[in-house]
Image: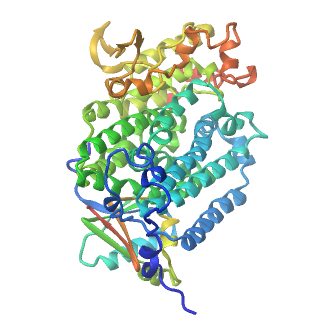
């Protein structure tokens, strides 16, 4: 018997709304979980998914994707690759696998809520596949990361990290809980599928795969792109949702969701992709700088989509364009000097040749961030290693959870150079909150009750949540002595400064 | 530096570098005859861009490769795309809006 083609039965099969007879509609779809915007179910039923897939085709395609990724892994037997990899690449792999694997696995529950509570049948269908996608992403990344455990216990953090109170994980969890896990199905989908997935995942999963391919890490490159082929499909949930919101007089709400989600995820990717692309990728394998990838994938590709569907660019767009060139450089300094608070072996990546590259890609780098590194370099060369680690903890942003560092190139002059180390603080109900930027402060001000209960790692130090004693801070963050980061190059990266500049660059 | 205002309306798939990507490029040139097809090669991926609208037919890709090609074959090798996507029974269409 001939099978019908998918397009011949798809619309009928996925039209699964019905009129309940035994319970009220609101009991099945509570507004606070389904739709707080009051849009009629007839309008939600106009959701026309741009990327139509049926289960039969989905399973076949996903099987082929897994065969492709896992067979590359098997063929290249990576134990030797890892042993021979530079501390640069080891740090990059640790930085990618540690926070991302379980975060993706958790995303499955966000998609499952969309599946359960959306009133749009087409969206429920897409979100079902999204749920399965995110399970796959969690599993494949933990499986690939665990390959290295025999060589390096750092990769245990691919599984462990999400259960800890490490400051980096608190930062990531706060952002993802905010946009994915603690909102109604419509809001979460707009923030996750549109602002996050359409906006930023290309950066890490395609941009970084180009670096990986150049570095010869074809297993990592293949895995990244394999994951992103799923993202490209299920990220399309967001677009028809925004169109329905706009058509029903809810543009302002949709815009606000995108503006919040976009900023919150930018901060995470700034640190993750920014440090990976501009520092941890070995110089000879860098395809582009973070700034160049950001312009390709976000400023061009994603911003066009925002405008095409009737949204405006976020109000902080000019600020964002400047942040692309600055924020991650400050974070890299912080990640290196506070290295004991991280579980991998951070590296500086500011050899003379790397500085030349940074200056070329980010003119003015040497006169700003470079001056900070000069102090670190002088201390290492003078054997004053203890002075490369600050004695006091940093100020942490009460929104993004990353360091309040200010913006090079903007603001007041200090010693003839410009550095604006502004703390965007806010006094609210008897306490002072600190923010790294105007948009982080803006997100808080939109809904203080939502955010004010969260305590940053520094808040926890000050209120006694973190146990006292020299090891209390680390043990609270889940780090035994062996799990505290040390310089990945054992400080030998400064040796290049003992050579004439031209020789060091070779 | 590229901005959102001057990026134009170029749309199309971003393909993982390899045989399928090469075949999709050839098919797009055939399926969008008379229109300029722009390519941009990177280390692990290739951007294929056509102004305003870009269509790729599964059968055309299959003719290039000498075997049957399905939507899943394209999806497995397409980590991203520029513009908006419309899956159709016989192919995939990318549109500026």
Up/down of A213 relative to B59, above or below? above
In the rendered structure, the answer to whether residue A401 lies left or right of residue A465 reads: left
Q: Which colour scheme appears in the figure?
A: rainbow
Q: Is residue A219 something that shows in the picture?
A: yes
Please report the residue visible at 67 percent of the width from the left and 7 percent of the height from the top. Answer: A468
Most extreme residue toward the right is A150
**Quarter of the image where the N terminus of chain A is located:** bottom right
Q: Quadrant of residue A385?
A: top right
Rendered location of residue A477, percent (x, y):
65, 22
Up/down of A404 relative to B72, above or below? above
Rendered location of residue A425, percent (x, y):
36, 14
Which residue is nearer to you in this view: A153 or A186? A186
Which residue is nearer to you in this view: A468 or A217? A468
Q: Quadrant of residue A270?
A: top left
Up/down of A71 relative to A311, above or below? below
Please report the residue visible at 24 percent of the width from the left and 59 percent of the height from the top. Answer: B9
């Amino acid at each position: 018997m001939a099978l019908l083609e998918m397009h011949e039965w798809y619309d009928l099969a996925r039209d699964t709304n019905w009129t309940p007879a035994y319970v009220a509609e609101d009991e099945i779809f509570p507004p606070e979980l389904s739709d707080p915007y009051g849009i009629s179910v007839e309008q939600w039923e106009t959701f026309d998914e741009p990327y139509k897939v049926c289960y039969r085709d989905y399973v076949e395609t996903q099987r082929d994707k897994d065969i492709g990724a896992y067979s590359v892994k098997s063929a290249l037997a990576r134990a030797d690759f890892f042993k021979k990899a530079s501390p640069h690449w080891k740090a990059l792999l640790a930085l990618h696998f540690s926070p991302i694997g379980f975060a993706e696995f958790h995303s499955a529950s966000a998609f499952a809520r969309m599946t359960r509570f959306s009133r749009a049948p087409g969206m429920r269908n897409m979100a079902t596949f999204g749920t399965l996608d995110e399970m796959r992403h969690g599993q494949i990344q933990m499986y690939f990361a665990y390959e290295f455990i025999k060589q390096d216990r750092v990769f245990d953090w691919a599984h462990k990290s999400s259960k800890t109170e490490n400051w980096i994980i608190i930062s990531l969890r706060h952002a993802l809980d905010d946009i994915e896990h603690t909102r109604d199905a419509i809001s979460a989908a707009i923030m996750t599928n549109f602002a996050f997935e359409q906006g930023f995942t290309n950066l890490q999963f395609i941009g970084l795969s180009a670096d990986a391919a150049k570095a010869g890490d074809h297993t990592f490159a293949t895995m990244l792109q394999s994951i992103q082929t799923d993202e490209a499909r299920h990220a399309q949930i967001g677009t028809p949702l925004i169109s329905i919101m706009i058509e029903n007089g809810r543009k302002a709400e949709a815009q606000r969701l995108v503006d919040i989600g976009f900023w919150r995820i930018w901060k995470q990717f700034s640190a993750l992709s920014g440090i990976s692309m501009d520092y941890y990728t070995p110089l000879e394998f860098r395809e582009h700088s973070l700034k160049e990838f950001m312009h390709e994938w976000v400023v061009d590709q994603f911003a066009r989509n925002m405008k095409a569907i009737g949204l405006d660019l976020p109000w902080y767009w000019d600020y964002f364009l400047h942040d692309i060139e600055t924020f991650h450089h400050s974070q890299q300094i912080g990640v290196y000097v506070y290295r004991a608070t991280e579980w991998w072996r951070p590296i500086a990546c500011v050899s003379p040749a790397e500085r030349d590259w940074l200056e070329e890609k980010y003119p003015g780098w040497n006169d700003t961030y470079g001056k900070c590194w000069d102090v670190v370099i002088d201390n290492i060369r003078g054997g004053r290693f203890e002075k490369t680690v600050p004695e006091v903890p940093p100020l942490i942003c009460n929104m993004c959870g990353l360091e309040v560092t200010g913006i090079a190139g903007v603001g007041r002059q200090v010693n003839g150079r410009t550095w604006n180390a502004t703390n965007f603080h806010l006094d609210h109900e008897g306490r002072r909150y600190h923010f790294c930027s105007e948009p982080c402060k803006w997100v808080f001000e939109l809904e203080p009750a939502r955010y004010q209960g969260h305590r940053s790692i520094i808040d926890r130090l000050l209120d006694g949540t973190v146990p006292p004693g020299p090891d209390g801070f680390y043990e609270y963050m889940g780090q035994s002595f062996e799990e505290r980061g040390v310089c990945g190059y054992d400080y030998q990266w400064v040796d290049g400064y003992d050579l004439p500049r031209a020789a060091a660059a070779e | 530096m590229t901005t959102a205002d001057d990026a134009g309306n170029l749309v199309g798939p971003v393909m993982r570098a390899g045989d399928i990507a090469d075949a999709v490029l050839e098919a797009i040139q055939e399926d969008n005859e008379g229109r300029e097809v722009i390519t941009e090669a990177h280390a692990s991926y290739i951007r294929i861009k056509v102004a305003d609208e870009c269509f790729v037919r599964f059968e055309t890709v299959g003719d290039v490769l000498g075997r049957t090609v399905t939507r899943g074959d394209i999806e497995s090798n397409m980590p991203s795309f520029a513009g908006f996507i419309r899956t159709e029974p016989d192919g995939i269409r990318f549109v500026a809006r």
